[in-house]
Image (cartoon, helix red, strand yellow):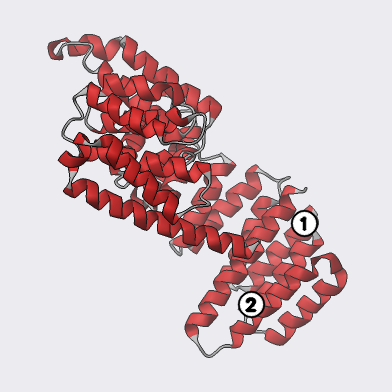
Amino acid sequence: MREEKLSDAIVYDKLHLLQRDFSGYIERNTVKVDANLPVFYGYVISALENSFPNLSDEAHDEFVDSITFKVLDTSKNIDDFDFVKRVMTNAIRFKKRKNAEVGINIVVGLKLLKVGDYVHALEYLKKYATLDAKLGTAVAFCYYTLSLREFKKDDESIRNHRPGEMELLARELMINLARIKPGVGQIRQLEIDDPAFLDKIFWQMILIGLEWFPSEKWFLEIGLKNAALTNDSVMRKRLLDIGSEHFYTDITFLREMYYYKLENRDAGGAAGIVNQLIKQYPNELEPVYLGLKLSLLTTKKMTYHSFRKLALSKGMPAQIIELFDFSFELLNREPKEAFNRLADFEREFSDLQYFATVLRYIAADFSSSEDVRVRRAKKALLDAIEQFCFVELKKR
């Protein structure tokens, strides 16, 4: 299994290199490419098939889509729809799957969106709006931007009081996205070389969506997911600030705030959120778990034993408590006691021997003289415990 994953990673890297090579060629020879589309696409497919004879149909088609976007993005003929149709015809001809036109429609629509041709972008994108949150917000953005043209500039008072048809379509789509809840990063065609324009549109519509529907928390949730995927700390903080006003009692938001506080070493803030969660959700185990996790990071014995006592009274699974006992001793530099705890865990839960073996190897690195190795071991321990505990808590 591991060999397959490694092979896939190597193929992906080589595909990316080939894509970069063609992107450079297109930039240097855009006029030549535009004038000889069949020859160019034939060259692309020949290089792809020779380099990757066993490439999946899906990966093959995604590569063609990426090249097509680059051709359109570089060309000066984007306003010529006969040219656009020729690009589409050539691209579709060389794709393998039956729904070959889907990816091409998306990349053509994205290019038209990028250059500000919202009317034609809608023609290509609107039927796919619910497949991905970014695609949906892009379509809503087209409607919204067109809505700004529905009234004259000197008719601002009317526009502010009566949404036009296009704005109503944007609102309808945004609330429909909140109902369907598509994921983010679901469509590979959205992974273009320069996604900045698409992210900018996404954030603009998420914030507008929160203005239109302030009680709809999906906009906050999907925004936080995208902030995590794109490492956008600024937007993450902004969304958390909005959430602190509108969703301060929601466990999903409070959980996100808790981890944000931990990442910023705000133990006091994280403790406050844990206490709030315990009061609001007295029958849930997750708030108690978050308290135990916090006590691991602070390594304060009184705090840990207080949460441990609470966990026992709430019926926390024994395997979770024993893993926390082991972790707490290890992080408090009590290796002998920690390994005793781990031995108890192995005897009591023989079906979890595989996990105990992993933890034993991680624990061994805590005695290393290399600080980097110890830090990595601590992170691996906390990540492993968290993943295990979330699985166990979901069974409850």
Q: Position of residue 288 (x, y in %)?
A: 67, 55
| Whether residue 99 is situated above or below residue 333 in the rendered picture | above
> What label does residue 316 carry, if any?
1
Residue 374 lies left or right of residue 166; in this view the side is right
The residue that appears at 79% across and 56% down in the rendered structure is 313
* Type of amino acid under label 1: Met
| Whether residue 216 is situated above or below residue 74 in the rendered picture | above
> What label does residue 156 carry, if any?
none
Q: Position of residue 225 (x, y in %)?
A: 47, 45
Q: According to the image, label 2 marks what residue? A: 362
Pick out the residue farthest to the left.
154
* Visible residue check, residue 357: yes
- Mark nearer the N terminus (2 vs 1): 1
The residue that appears at 25% across and 33% down in the rendered structure is 114
* Cα gap from disc 2 to disc 1, whole angstroms: 24 Å
The residue that appears at 46% across and 56% down in the rendered structure is 12
